[in-house]
C-alpha cells in the first residue's frame, strides 16, 4: 500500500498552524548548526521560509482570512527565531543588509498579525479603488491563453478567482459585524472603478470572458464538453463578482461610516476599532522609520511652510517678465465655465500673492488639451488611441519624449551605464480618473494625458525624473543589470515604498544638482541660466509648449517650479495622510489644504485626496525615504570629501534593491567606512 510522505517543512508548518491559536507562547525550533557558515545558514533560513509560506498558501491569488494571518504569524516567528540564532557579526556588510531586511520584515508582519482584525495586516484588505485587486485579479482570470493546453491549466486559475472573490465577500461581511468597514465615500469609488474596469462592450463582466471568447472563436480546437466547462467556470466567476458588487452597493454601504460627502470627517483609519494602533502600524510599514503620526504631521507642516520661499522667488521672476497683472483663460472649478481673468500677482504691499500665482499657473494655457492647440499626426498617434483625448495625448508625449532624450545624456554622468530603455505610454481612458498622474512598471512610464487629470506643462521635467530616469526606471533596471554576486532570492522579491518612492523623490532633487534648471548659486539653488534640461536657448519660445514662456530663463524657472510643487506635494502628504487618518480630516479639508499650499490642479488635488484616504499610510513614505537618502548623501560627502563619487554612491544605494530605510542607513554607513 502506497503512503504519502510529507517533507519536514510541511510537517513543521502543519504543526505550527495547528498551534497558532494556542495560548502557550513557547516555540521549539530546531536551531542551525553553529559549525555551518553563517552566510550559508542565513540563505538556508530565507529559502526555507519561502518554501514554508508557499506550502502554507499556494493559491494563485492568496487566502486572506484571520486564520491565515495567524498561521503566517506562526511561520514568521519560527523563522525570525532561526535568523536571530545566526551570528550577525560574522556576516559581510553585504549579507548584513539581507539579514536586517529579513528581520525587519518578520517583525513588522508579526506586529500586524498581533493586532485585532489581523486580515488588515495585508495589502489586499480592504480593497479600495486605488489598489483594486478585484480588477487586477479578474484581468488574470479572464486572460487569453496561448494554447489549448494552457486553457486546460487555466481552468483552475478561474476557479481560484471565484473562491477568492467569495472569500472577499465574506471578509467584507465580517466587517459589518466587527464595525471595521470602509467609509461610504470609498465604498462608492470602489464600486464605480470595479464596474468600469470589468466592462467590455455591452458585457458588464466581459473582462472575465476574454479567454472564453477566444476559445469560442477557435472552437474546432476544443471539445464541446471542455467549452461548456470553461463557460461554466467563467460564469461562476462573473456571478461571484456580481454578487460582491451587489452586496457592496446595498448591505455593505448601508450603515457604513460617514455620509459619503466630501465634508465627511469619519473616513480615516483612526475611526476604526483599534484604528489608531492600526494606523501607526501602517505608518511604520510604509515609512520604515518608526516615527509616530503626530511627529510626521508636524514635520509635514514645517516643510510646507519652508518650501514657499523658493516658490516666491520663481513668482518674482515671472512678475519681472510678464508684469504683475497678466490675463489668461481660467476655468471655474464649480461651473466649468472658461473665461478671461486678470491675476494680481502682487498684493497691496507689493509682495507676491502666492495664491494668485498658483491660480495663474493653472490657467488653460498650461494644460495639454486645454490650451486650444490641436496636435495630430505625430509618431505617437497610434499609442494615443488608448487615451481619451488624442490631441492632448500626442502633444504630451512629444514634450515628455523630448525631455527624455535631453535628460539621458545628463543622467549618464552620475550613474553606471544603463542599457535597458523605457517607453512613455498613456494610461487607458477607462483608468484615467482613478490611476493618478503617472506611474512606472515593466519599463513603461505610464502617463495620464486626460486634460482634467494630468499635470501642467511645467511639470514635465520633474515627473519624468521621478517616474523614469533616473527614478523608478533606474531602480528597476539597475537591480537587474548590476546585481550583487550572491543576492538571495528572497531579497529580490521584497518591496518597500519608502525606499522606492524616497529614491524617486531624491532623483527629482538630483535634477537640481545635474543642472536641469540652470547652474546653481552659492546656496545650491538654480539660477535658471545655462541649463542642461529641456529649456534650450535656441528654442522658438513663441511655439514651444504652445508659447507659454517668454524665454529660456522663464522656462527653466517654471520647470523648476514644477519640481518645487512636486516636492511640496510630498511635504503636504505628511500632513494630509496623518490629517485624514489620525486627526479626522475630511476629503474637503485635505483638498483645501493642498489648494492653499501648492499650485496643484483641481483634477490632481481631487485624485490625490481620495488616494490618501484609500491607500493608508503610503503617502508618508515619499518624504520619509527621501530625507534618509539625503542625510546619507550629506554624510558621505562630508566624510569622504574628494574621495566621494556619485556613481559609486548610487551604486551602493541601488544594487541591493528595496530595503527598509533603517537598513539603508546601516548600508551606507558601512560603505563609507570601506571607502576610507
Image (cartoon, helix red, strand yellow):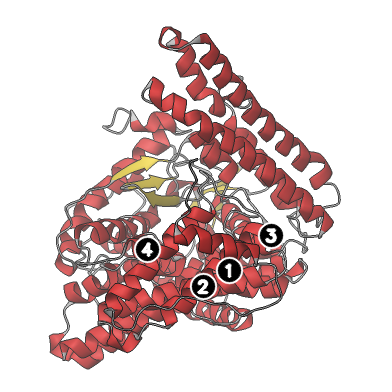
What residue appears at the point 27 percent right and 47 percent down from the top-left corner?
422
Q: Looking at the picture, tell me which residue is in the foreground, 82 or 1.
A: 1
Left or right? Give the position of 364 relative to 538. right
> What is the CA distance from the residue labelled 3 to the residue labelled 4?
44 Å
Q: Residues within 10 Å of mark 4 (few under 14, many from 20)?
A: some
What count of labels does the image hold? Answer: 4
Secondary element under disc 1, as helix, strand or loop, is: helix
For marks 4 and 2, the one nearer the N-term is 4
Q: Residues within 10 Å of mark 1 (few under 14, many from 20)?
A: many
What residue appears at the point 62 percent right and 78 percent down from the top-left corner?
293
Question: Residue tagged by mark 1?
Answer: 74
Indicate the position of residue 195 as horizontal and vertical percent values.
64, 34
Question: Residue tagged by mark 3?
Answer: 587
Indicate the position of residue 145 as horizontal and vertical percent values.
41, 26
| Quadrant placement of the C terminus | bottom left
For marks 3 and 1, the one nearer the N-term is 1
Q: Which mark is residue 47?
A: 4
Left or right? Give the position of 389 relative to 131. left
Amino acid at each position: 500500500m502506497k503512503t504519502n510522505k510529507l517533507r519536514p517543512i510541511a510537517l513543521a508548518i502543519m504543526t505550527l498552524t495547528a498551534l497558532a491559536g494556542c495560548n502557550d507562547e513557547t516555540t521549539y525550533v530546531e536551531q542551525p548548526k553553529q559549525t555551518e557558515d553563517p552566510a550559508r545558514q542565513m540563505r538556508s533560513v530565507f529559502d526555507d521560509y519561502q518554501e514554508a509560506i508557499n506550502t502554507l498558501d499556494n493559491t494563485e491569488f492568496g487566502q486572506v482570512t484571520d486564520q491565515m494571518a495567524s498561521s503566517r504569524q506562526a511561520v514568521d516567528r519560527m523563522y525570525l527565531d532561526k535568523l536571530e540564532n545566526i551570528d550577525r557579526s560574522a556576516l559581510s556588510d553585504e549579507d548584513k543588509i539581507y539579514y536586517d531586511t529579513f528581520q525587519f520584515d518578520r517583525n513588522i508582519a508579526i506586529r500586524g498579525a498581533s493586532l485585532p482584525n489581523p486580515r488588515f495586516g495585508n495589502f489586499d484588505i480592504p480593497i479600495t479603488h486605488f489598489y483594486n485587486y478585484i480588477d487586477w485579479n479578474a484581468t488574470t482570470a479572464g486572460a487569453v491563453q496561448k494554447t489549448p493546453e494552457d486553457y486546460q491549466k487555466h481552468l483552475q486559475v478561474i476557479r481560484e478567482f471565484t473562491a477568492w472573490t467569495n472569500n472577499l465577500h465574506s471578509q467584507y461581511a465580517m466587517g459589518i459585524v466587527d464595525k471595521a468597514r470602509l467609509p461610504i465615500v470609498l465604498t462608492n469609488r470602489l464600486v464605480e472603478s470595479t464596474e468600469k474596469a470589468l466592462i467590455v462592450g455591452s458585457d458588464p463582466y466581459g473582462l472575465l470572458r476574454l479567454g472564453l471568447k477566444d476559445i469560442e472563436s477557435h472552437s474546432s480546437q476544443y471539445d464541446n464538453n471542455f467549452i461548456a466547462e470553461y463557460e461554466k467556470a467563467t460564469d461562476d466567476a462573473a456571478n461571484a463578482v456580481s454578487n460582491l458588487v451587489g452586496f457592496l452597493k446595498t448591505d455593505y454601504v448601508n450603515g457604513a461610516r460617514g455620509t459619503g460627502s466630501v465634508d465627511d470627517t469619519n473616513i480615516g483609519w483612526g475611526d476604526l476599532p483599534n484604528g489608531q494602533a492600526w494606523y501607526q502600524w501602517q505608518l511604520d510599514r510604509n515609512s520604515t522609520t518608526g516615527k509616530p503620526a503626530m511627529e510626521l504631521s508636524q514635520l509635514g507642516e514645517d516643510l510646507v511652510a519652508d518650501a514657499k520661499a523658493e516658490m516666491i522667488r520663481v513668482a518674482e521672476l515671472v512678475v519681472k517678465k510678464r508684469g504683475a497683472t497678466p490675463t489668461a483663460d481660467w476655468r471655474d472649478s464649480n461651473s466649468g465655465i472658461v473665461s478671461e481673468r486678470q491675476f494680481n500677482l502682487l498684493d497691496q504691499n507689493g509682495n507676491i500673492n502666492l495664491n494668485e500665482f498658483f491660480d495663474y499657473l493653472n490657467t488653460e494655457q498650461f494644460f495639454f488639451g486645454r490650451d486650444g492647440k490641436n496636435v495630430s499626426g505625430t509618431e505617437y498617434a497610434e499609442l494615443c488611441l488608448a487615451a481619451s483625448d488624442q490631441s492632448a495625448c500626442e502633444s504630451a508625449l512629444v514634450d515628455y519624449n523630448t525631455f527624455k532624450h535631453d535628460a539621458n545624456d545628463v543622467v549618464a554622468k552620475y550613474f553606471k551605464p544603463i542599457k535597458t530603455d523605457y517607453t512613455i505610454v498613456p494610461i487607458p481612458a477607462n483608468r484615467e480618473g482613478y490611476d493618478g498622474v503617472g506611474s512606472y512598471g515593466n519599463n513603461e512610464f505610464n502617463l495620464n494625458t486626460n486634460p482634467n487629470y494630468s499635470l501642467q506643462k511645467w511639470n514635465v521635467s520633474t515627473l519624468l525624473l521621478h517616474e523614469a530616469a533616473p527614478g523608478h526606471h533606474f531602480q528597476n533596471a539597475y537591480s537587474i543589470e548590476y546585481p550583487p554576486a550572491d543576492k538571495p532570492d528572497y531579497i529580490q522579491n521584497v518591496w518597500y515604498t519608502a525606499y522606492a518612492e524616497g529614491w524617486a523623490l531624491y532623483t527629482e532633487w538630483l535634477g537640481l544638482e545635474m543642472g536641469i534648471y540652470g547652474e546653481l548659486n552659492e546656496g545650491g539653488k538654480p539660477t535658471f541660466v545655462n541649463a542642461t534640461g529641456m529649456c534650450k536657448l535656441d528654442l522658438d519660445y513663441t511655439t514651444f509648449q504652445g508659447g507659454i514662456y517668454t524665454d529660456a530663463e522663464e522656462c527653466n524657472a517654471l520647470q523648476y517650479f514644477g519640481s518645487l510643487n512636486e516636492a511640496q506635494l510630498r511635504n503636504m502628504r505628511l500632513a494630509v495622510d496623518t490629517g485624514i487618518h489620525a486627526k479626522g480630516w475630511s476629503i474637503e479639508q485635505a483638498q483645501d489644504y493642498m489648494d492653499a499650499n501648492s499650485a496643484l490642479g483641481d483634477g490632481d488635488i481631487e485624485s490625490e485626496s481620495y488616494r490618501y484616504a484609500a491607500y493608508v499610510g503610503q503617502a508618508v513614505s515619499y518624504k520619509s525615504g527621501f530625507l534618509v537618502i539625503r542625510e546619507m548623501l550629506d554624510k558621505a560627502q562630508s566624510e569622504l570629501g574628494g574621495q566621494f563619487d556619485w556613481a559609486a554612491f548610487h551604486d551602493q544605494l541601488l544594487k541591493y534593491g528595496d530595503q527598509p530605510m533603517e537598513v539603508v542607513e546601516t548600508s551606507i554607513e558601512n560603505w563609507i567606512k570601506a571607502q576610507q
